[in-house]
Each structure stands twice: as structure tokens, then as C-alpha cells.
Amino acid sequence: MSEDLSQRHSAFRFHGTWREFAGIAFPNLLLTIVTLGIYRFWATTREREYLWGKTDFIDERLEWTGKGMELFIGFIMVFFLLGLPLIVIQLVSQGLIFRGETVIAAAVTLVMFLLLFYLTGLAYFRALRYRLSRTYWRGIRGGSDDPGFQYGLSYIWRSFVGWLPIFLLVPWSMISLWNERWNAMSFGPHRFSANAEWKPLMRRYLLFYLVPFLVFVGAVAFGIAIAASGGQPDALGGTGMAIGGILLIFAVLAMYIVLPLAALAYYSKYFRLAVGGLRLHDLEFEFRARAPDWILFFLANMAIIICTLGIGYIFMPYRNWKFFIDHMEAYGEVNIDELTQSETIVSKHGEGLLDAFDVGAI
């Protein structure tokens, strides 16, 4: 039996309401405060159980099977296997500086930086693998047998290559890492295929890229004019000071208004291209939100948080998930008779950074 998604209005549907979510979010907030933050792992699990359970894919509900204890264990592993060693390394580095051994201290600091960067890449990979392994649809889950160690190395060198030519290859870095991450994943018996292109991103990226560059050039030009006047702003005259004031206002507006909007415009194009290049057997995916949708969504979130004096932040998981599902679409056919359970390894720990060091993988 197969399901033809081309005849459907939408493959994904979300049935939750903010009022229902409030019944979960407010108790979670209170319990997290009372337990000094420890309950947040179980709070995250309760939220995901609700959000997943209220989401349909082809008229079948998703199911989240993760446990709060898994997330808590992941956090404990992060603290003992990474947090404490990094604190010790930092203290050793400071001691070396006081003893005048700056070269060794710099080498230790560099190693610590590379280690953190490597583990950040592994954290992205393992978090995706964990979430797929805990997401069920028709009793079928996803996952990956790839431990992610190679991806951690790719995260380092691809990021550095993206930064080296004055950050001009960041779109290539982001898209190539997305493709590598998803190409290692599967759902049921089928592997994902990610072939997103990065070149269509460049025009949108340059819009974001040029804003701080133009502000910097303007600041340098104004500084040169001040220096040429002998360091006395009054020497520029009234017209010069007025122009300087206007440039300052434009610089502030550019950094605090134009730059965030340009960043959202870039990210909207990035996510649309990334999802559009994703395949699962005969399924193709599309994310339909465009830049105006992202901007309105971001402004609404900010307004909710500000107007509620921060309390509205507890509704952000609901709003983020609803925005994602409302704009997500799938095309193609799903042959349900072909679906079998995934045989990938199920990690025993949650999304802590040191899920990269889970015992089974090592």
C-alpha cells in the first residue's frame, strides 16, 4: 500500500494550541525553578512529547520516546568528561603564563580551542542522530550507525575554509556540513540524501556580509578625517560634524536593525535551500517560509517576550515547532509495505555535548 502525497493539501499538520501547551509550560517553569534547573531535562521531554504527539505526517501522529533521564545523563557526562578537564586546562594555562612560558600556554590554549570546536561538531551530529532515534512514525524510527567522529573533523576544516577568505565561503561551509550530516542519517530502511547547492545563497549572503563591512569603512573614513584635522572634531566644521552625526546614526541603525534583518533573510534562504535538497527514498521535502515570514515570526517572538517581561519565553518551543511544521511540506509516495524498523544503533544518552563520548561509541 502506498500514500500519494501529491493529492494532499499538506503532508504535515499540527493540531496543538498554545492554551494546551501552557498547561505544560507553566508547571515546567515552576518545577525547574524549585529544583534549581535540574527538572529542565524532564521539562524538555514533556514539551517534545506534546509537540510530536500533536503533529501528523500523512494522517499518522509522530511519537517522541526520549526520556528526561537520558538528557540528564548526557549533561552529567558533559560536566565530568569535558567541563572539569577544561577547567583544569585553563588553570594550567594561566599558571604557565605567570611562569613566563607563553609559548606552551598558547599551544595548550590552541589545543583546548580545537577540542571544543571538534566537540561542537560532534554535538550537532549526535543531537540529530538522537532526535531521529527517538522519533517514531507508524512504529518506525530513524537514526544512524555513524558515530560522528569524522564529522567532527569535517566541522573543523570546513568551518576554517569558510572563514579563511574573509568569511566569503561561509555559505559553502554551512551547506556542505548540512549535506554531510543528513547523508549519514536514515529513517526506517531508507537513507536520507542531501544534495543542497550553496551558490544560490551567495547573493543573499553578500547582503548580510556587506552591512558590517560598510559600517567599518564609514568608521575608518570618519576616523581618517578626524586624524587629518589634527584630532580636533571641531576642525571639521559644522557641516562635517553634521555628516559625522548622520553617519553615526546610520551605523547604529545598520548594526541593530538592518544587520539582524539581513541575517534573517540569509537564514531563510539557507534553510529553504537546505531542506529543498533533502530526499528520503521517493520523498522530497520543501520549506515554504520566506524572508518576510521569518522576520514577522522573529518580531512576534520578541514582542511576546518583551510584553510579558520574559515569561513568554516558555512558549518559544511551541511557536518554533508550529512555525516549522506549518511551513514544512513533502512530495512523492510512501510505500508503507516497504517500511521496516531501522536497525541503527540507539544511543543511550541524550543531547549533552558529550553525547560525542557516549560509552557505546568508544
Image (cartoon, rainbow, N blue to C red):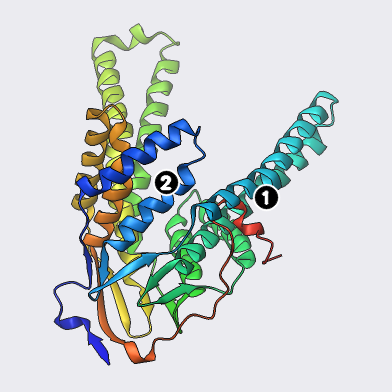
The dot on residue 43 is 2
* Res 194 seen here: no
Give 121 or 175, whichever is nearer the viewer: 121
- The image shows residue 87 at horizontal and vertical percentages of 71, 36
Q: Quadrant of residue 275?
A: bottom left
- The image shows residue 274 at horizontal and vertical percentages of 36, 66
User: What quarter of the picture does the C terminus occupy?
Assistant: bottom right
- The image shows residue 227 at horizontal and vertical percentages of 45, 17
Give 98 or 146, whichever is nearer the viewer: 146
* Res 220 seen here: yes
Q: Quadrant of residue 175?
A: bottom left
Above or below residue 92? Residue 242 is: above
Residue drawn at 26 percent across, 29 percent down: 306
Q: Nearer the viewer, mark 2 or mark 1?
A: 2
Give 355 or 234, whichever is nearer the viewer: 355
- The image shows residue 281 at horizontal and vertical percentages of 38, 84
The dot on residue 85 is none
Residue drawn at 51 percent across, 56 percent down: 162
Q: Quadrant of residue 280?
A: bottom left
Q: Amino acid at mark 1?
A: Leu
Q: Which residue is mark 1?
A: 115
Residue drawn at 60 percent across, 51 percent down: 73
In the picture, measured across the screen, residue 194 lies left or right of residue 244, that is right
Q: Amino acid at mark 2?
A: Ala
Distance from Cα at disc 2 to Cα at disc 1: 30 Å
Above or below residue 219? Residue 190 is: below
User: What quarter of the picture does the N terminus occupy?
Assistant: bottom left
Q: Are marks 2 and 1 in contact (CB under 8 Å)?
A: no
Q: Please tell me which of labels 2 and 1 falls first in the chain.
A: 2
